[in-house]
Image: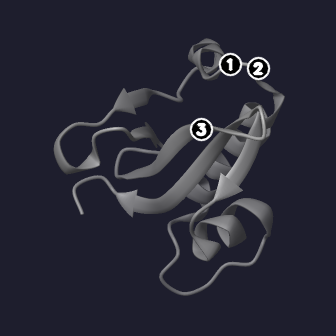
Amino acid sequence: MEVYYSSENTERLAETAEHRKGDPPSDVITRLQRLVKIIQQLDNLLELRTYKGYRMEKLKGDLAGRRSIRLGEQFRIFFEEKRIEDVKAIIFGEVTKHYD
């Protein structure tokens, strides 16, 4: 699957080793970077279930149509699954604290 980002900050966290003040803890960033590598190897998002610790949740209410994956007890990342030029793609949003 292809990975895209709707947030420059999330792209920076996922693709570089650059850390800034206010970023999530380093263990959360490491899990995000691992998640991106895993998703790039998948043909179908449901295959993510075979990887321990990456729990996918379908969101409701104002966030309906999106999903999230926990990156630790407090942090999660929002994403949408789309087709871009006949390729399955994941578009990641912001990394946020769970109830922010």
- Report which residue position mark 1 lands on: 44
Q: Position of residue 90 (x, y in %)?
A: 63, 42
Asked whether 33 or 43 is in front, the reply is 43
Mark 1: amino acid = Asn
Dot 1 crowding, Cα within 10 Å, few <14, some 14–19, many 20+: few
Above or below residue 61? Residue 1 is above
Which quarter of the image is occupied by the N terminus?
top right
Q: CA distance from mark 2 to mark 1?
A: 4 Å
Residue 2 figure quarter: top right
Query: How far from the left and from the top, in percent, is residue 54?
Result: 53, 29
Q: Position of residue 9 (x, y in %)?
A: 60, 75
> What residue sits 54% from the left and 87% below the top?
21
Q: Which residue is mark 2?
A: 43
- Can residue 71 be seen in this snapshot? no
Q: Identify the residue shown where x is 34% and y is 30%.
A: 58
Q: Residue 39: where, in percent of width, then height?
A: 72, 34
Instruction: Kindly state the secondary structure of the residue where label 2 is placed.
Output: loop
Residue sticking out furthest to the left = 61
Q: Secondary structure at mark 1?
A: loop
Q: Nearer the viewer, mark 2 or mark 3?
A: 3
Q: Residue at x 22, y 37 (%)?
A: 60
The Cα atoms of the two marked residues, 2 and 3, are separated by 13 Å
The residue type indicated by label 3 comes to Lys
**Which residue type does callout 2 highlight?**
Asp
Residue at which label 3 appears: 82
Query: How crowded is the residue under tag 2: few (<14 C-alpha within 10 Å), some, or many (20+)?
Result: some
Q: Quadrant of residue 73?
A: top left
